[in-house]
Amino acid sequence: MVTLAVVGAGSRGVAYARHAVESGRARVVAVADPLESRRARFPEAGQYADWRELAALPRQADAVIIATQDRDHVEPALRFSELGYDILLEKPMAVSEDDCQAIVAAAERRVPTDAIFAVCHVLRYTPYTRALKALLDAGRIGEIVSIQHLEPVGWWHQAHSFVRGNWRRTDESTFMLLAKSCHDLDWLVHLTGKRVVRVSSFGGLRHFRPENRPAGAADRCLDCAVEPDCPYSAKRIYLPLAGREVWPLSVLTDDVSEQGVLEALRTGPYGRCVYACDNDVVDHQVVNMEFEGGTTASFTMTAFTPALHRQTRIFGTRGSIDGDGDRLTVHDFVTGRSETVDTSPTGDPTAGGGHGGGDAGLVEAFLTAVETRDRAPVLSSPGESLHSHLVAWAAERSRLHGETVTLHA
């Protein structure tokens, strides 16, 4: 039985811990979070208001799940590495290149000791990705020449997390590509098996701006005369979930009754008009990538979609694959035939749906690695995780400065 400490008992920390406990292979023995209501989610565990209290003690668990806010990752990651914990670290690793480099250096120093370090690149662990990767590695479409990849964030998810929520501002969290789409950049590196060498990017904050506020709109949805006709109505997004302990409602309030939700919308950040927030992260962005050997990929992140699985088209020298997160359609240029592979993902593509089985797959792989002392089940090394983060920074520099950025090995 693997023993776990949870540092940051918000939605991500709780999701990973619950998957671990429900597998029957782990138990949570310590939890650190400043909010008592969040610590209470693990009543049998030792309770700490600050992770430093836990880190001041001798090692209390086999492994630690670090799922604090993005800007607060680096200190606990370095300290718990020093203490000998195996580490499951929520993405992004950190919000500066120097801090990411420091975390990776600490992880790599422990490689000779068989230490386990995993960044939560959950898309690598879905049944869909495993099936797609197997097709590519088997040479079903020959050599990959180019890829088109879409991340449909979803109109309400953008409003929840990136306009009203914790990831709305670059100075308080980080830029959109690192906060949300380092999943996708890492996934493209995983599929190709190659490093990115050049990047260009375009995008911006197009819609969620004060000048797009409808005439007559109020500062809060509960007071707004035009709310019934607004796609981003907080009442429409959250009130149908009242009474249920589910994401994203669990982010708003611990009191998920209708009255509790109404109070959160009346007084908290999630009831604000999306045109009257202090957000600055982009709502659409495209990234063009050149990989080693000349393979290219174009990636689009956009808010203005339903919250769907990622959609991908991969073009090879002997065939192509179209994927929608559920099914893969393989087109064979030799036979002229098409084959459909149904991967039957568990859950929807959102965090609340477990990222299509990725959350559970990641946790299972991490627990196996901790139990066996074999890092092989963890599908990304510290250096690989760092590379995909560096691609995100390169793309953001390109977007801001209008230049093609070269990544050096």
Image (cartoon, rainbow, N blue to C red):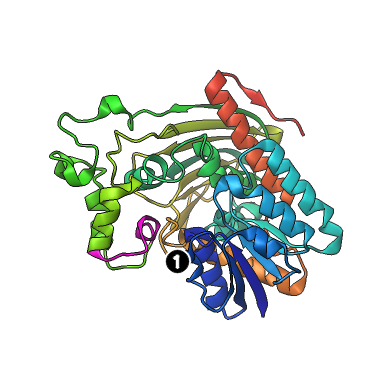
The residue shown at (53%, 27%) is 201
Q: How far across and down, in percent of the image, does residue 24 sit? A: 58, 81
Dot 1, how many residues are within 10 Å of its Cα: few (below 14), some (14-19), or many (20+)?
few
Closest to the observer, 377 or 229: 229
Residue 110 seen: yes
Stretch in magenta: 247-258
Q: Position of residue 126 (x, y in %)?
A: 54, 60
User: Foreground residue, 47 or 217?
Assistant: 47
Which residue is painted at 72% across and 48% down in the image?
Answer: 103
Residue at (74%, 69%) from the top-left corner? 59
Q: Is 250 contained in the magenta span? A: yes
Is residue 314 something that shows in the picture? no
Q: Could you tell me residue 130's position as x and y percent?
A: 58, 60
Task: Please give the count of numbered marks on the rendered protein.
Answer: 1
Q: Hey, which residue is sitting farthest right in the picture?
A: 112
Q: Position of residue 121 (x, y in %)?
A: 59, 53
> Would residue 249 be found to the left or right of residue 61 on screen?
left
Q: Which residue is mark 1?
A: 37
Q: In the rendered structure, which amino acid carries the disc numbered 1?
A: Ser
